[in-house]
Each structure stands twice: as structure tokens, then as C-alpha cells.
Amino acid sequence: MRSYEIRQINTDKIQLILRNDQQVSRMLTIKIGDRFWIQPDNPNKLKHRGRECIIKNFHKDDLGNYVQAVVSFLDNNRTARVDLEDLVVEYNDGSVGQTDELIKSSDETPRYLPENVPDSLFTRNELKSMGRIPNQESAAYVSYPEQKREYPLFQIEETKLTKRQKGFSLVPKDYTIEEVLDKRKHALKVRLLQVGNQTH
């Protein structure tokens, strides 16, 4: 079940928290003056979809809860109200150069988009394919906006090799760092194609 929580940080900044089945899947800090794209989770909600805007103010309901943002659209400078949960940092149209390199949530833990993850950071599955496990807490997260999911990233320097049982094994050999990075590049190409197809 999907639910939204909106927290006021100060008079010109709020935080949107999206949960799927009680698990936090997306956190977004929205500040007056910042730019955002409009991309509703509901595929049938087409009004203003794909437009870029600047946050001008926030609108409350009768109970005093923040529910909408007053925005100015960059394409015609007109203002309108949009639901807070429809705002995203990037719009998934498959184009290059329209994504923020880094997304940060309230705990200041870096959140990278897949195409901008540094070569020194790896997911738990990537480390497993190299026969390594992390020995420190995650250093960042990689966020997939189109899936509304994110995964922890670990510094390669803060990992260790797993102990292998001696003797015959059907377990395939461990990948090198270079091989994993090559696999990552291929996965990014596939993702861009998939995301592009979803927007047509």
C-alpha cells in the first residue's frame, strides 16, 4: 500500500516521504525557489505531466496540512497548483543531461541516480558477484525514480573477501571490479531504453 507523509522543515522547505508497504521508497526535500519536474505516480494523471517548474509557495488544506505547491512553469511562466507527491527531481524522458547528479535526503546521505554512481561505490549484489561483503555501513544510495526504489552503496575500500570453502565448487568465479563496471554500463544502456519506451 502506497502512502505519503509531508513534514515541514521550515517556512520555505518541506520534505515528502513516500512509503510502499511501510517501507520508505522515496524521500524528497522541496524548497521554494527549487526546480522540479512533474511526473505523477498515477499513469492516468496527465495534467502538467512532463513540465518543469519552479516552486513559488505551498498551499495548505482546511486542516493546515501541506498538500500542494504553487509553481511557475518554465515553458510559459504561468502559475498553478500541483500535488506535492507529483514532483520529482528528474523527468524520465530518456534524455541526457536533464538529471540531477546527486539527490540528498534529510539525513544528508548522498543519493545518486544510476548513471552517476561513482566507480568506487557498489551495491551489495555487485559486491557479492566479486566475492566481497561490506564491513562498514552504506556510504550512499542509488535511486531509481521510475521504480520508486533505492539501494545502499558501499565503498570498495570498506569491503572484505568472503571465505570460500576449499574443494570442488560449482560456484562461478568472482568478477573483477572492471568486469562489474562493464556490466553496470550495459545495464545503464538497457535502463535508458526501457525508461525511454515507458514515456512514449
Image (spheres, rainbow, N blue to C red):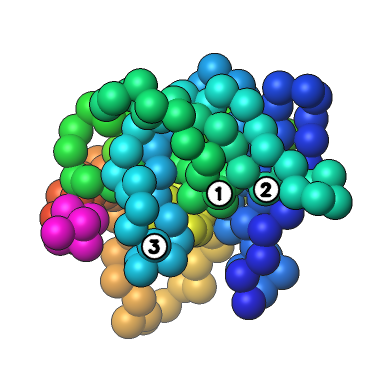
Amino acid type at circle 2 is Val
Q: Quadrant of residue 91?
A: top left
**Which residue is rendered at x = 70% and y = 27% of the image?**
13
Relative to 152, residue 100 above or below: above
Q: Would you name the residue on which mark 2 appears?
A: 67
Spatial CA distance of label 2 from label 1 is 6 Å
The residue identified by callout 1 is 83
The reply to whether dot 1 and dot 3 touch (C-beta < 8 Å) is: no
Q: Are marks 2 and 1 in contact (CB under 8 Å)?
A: yes
Q: Which residue is mark 3?
A: 45
From the image, which quarter does the C terminus lie in?
Answer: bottom left
Which residue reaches farthest right? 63
Magenta region: which residues? 195-200
Q: Residues within 10 Å of mark 3 (few under 14, many from 20)?
A: few
Q: Is residue 128 magenta?
A: no
Q: Could you tell whether 128 is left or right of 30 in the image?
A: left
Q: Secondary structure at mark 2?
A: strand
Q: Earlier in the sequence, mark 2 or mark 1?
A: 2
